[in-house]
Amino acid sequence: MNSLRISARAEKRLKSGHLWIFSNEVDIQATPLKGMTDGEQVVVEAPSGRVIGYALMNPTALICGRLVGRRKSLDRKALKQRIQQALLLRETVYDAPYYRLFYADGDYLPGLIIDRYGDHCVVQINSKGLEPFQADIAEILHELVQCEGVLFRNDGNSRKVEGLEVKDNDEYGSVPDRVTLIENGVQFQAPVKSGQKTGWFYDHRDNRARIANLCEGKRVLDVFSYVGAWGIQCLAGGANELVSVDASEQALDVLEQNADMNGFGDRIQSFHGNAFDAMESFVEAKEKFDVIVLDPPAFIKRKKDMRNGQQAYRRINELGLRLLEKDGLMVSASCSMHLHHDQLQDAVQQGARHVDRALSLIYKGGHAADHPIHPAIAETEYLKAQIYLRRG
């Protein structure tokens, strides 16, 4: 096994618990990156030559190495132990098999995402070094949770960043186009083969439960609704009416079927189109809502997007506040890793002052427990959800 000699700065960060090695932190005189291959497993050495751990390599990427073990290298046995440990946490926290089973760095194995939908699992591999383990992962999931089928989504943008091939999905066993899941007592179908990411977003589970409990008798607007995770749970919480907006017709079709499945088909309206345009048309029509949910895709994907992204968050929240009834509630959410809670709060407040609204922040939330945060890796804590009360 080849060695990778790193700088003192990288050694300090890895000692603190971090798992990433950047290409500019490698001693290329002692261990040239050009001599390493994609996916290769190496021994990581401190400047002194002391062994720190083992990493999977992507030598041409900015993050050229990802630590996968400190005492031993990654093999099938170690991989199964890591997944088994993650499964134990989920089975301790949840009484039904619907959750993110493995959360990459948060479960101490960068580049591996596994979402469980009862008897089916959907996997995303975002690390070159884990690609050769694909069949092992499928077998391990069958052994641990008796999966009828495991789907590997190979079409995500995150694979492009890692230099992985974007290709057709791989399937082990049988996985339907849509799978059934239950979240907070509400049943849904998720389009795992054609939908966003793995088909569903478990991360907002707790935040959805919080707002759903405040919706009795309310009129709800769900913007960027996807397949209805927020809005349909609001209906289950007692909302009288749901208006959903999304740019995907396919997602809205699934949303309507999810509403029908739960007996809410006569309480929904769906609007296909751009969220900003739809909200502006609602403002012009003088529409008002008691509860508004704003859960957009990441407006800030890279640090250089920060300025434009913050403006987008301010604008979408300002539009939401124009549509919010007095004493109404608004959920403002962000999955942008680079935007912190206080920055989202600033964007909401700027929007509020621009339209002369008085607000109180009554709730701050983040990930559900199936997205454990790595204390040394800030990037594992990307999710924010804030609930505001309009006072005037």
Image: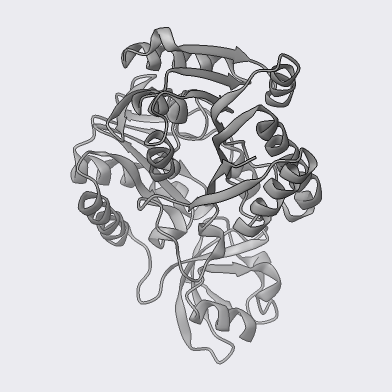
Q: Residue 293: which quarter of the image?
A: top right
- Residue 343 appearing in the image: yes
How many numbered discs sit on the rendered protein?
0
Q: Residue at x 33, y 42 (%)?
A: 99
Q: Residue at x 60, y 33 (%)?
A: 326
Where is residue 116 drawn, in percent x and y? 32, 38
Where is residue 5 drawn, in percent x and y? 59, 80
Q: Is residue 2 above or below residue 341?
A: below
Where is residue 345 drawn, in percent x and y? 64, 53
Q: Is residue 343 above or below residue 211?
A: below
Return the residue nearer the eye: 171 or 251: 251
Q: In this view, which residue lies farthest toward the bottom?
A: 48
- Left or right? Give the position of 322 relative to 141: right
Q: Residue at x 58, y 46 (%)?
A: 335
- Left or right? Give the position of 132 relative to 357: left
Q: Residue at x 67, y 75 (%)?
A: 25
Q: In this view, which residue lies farthest toward the front?
A: 392
Return the residue nearer the eye: 77 or 229: 229
Q: In this view, which residue lies farthest toward the top?
A: 266
Where is residue 34 drawn, in percent x and y? 68, 65
Q: Is residue 83 above or below residue 20?
A: above
- Residue 251 appearing in the image: no
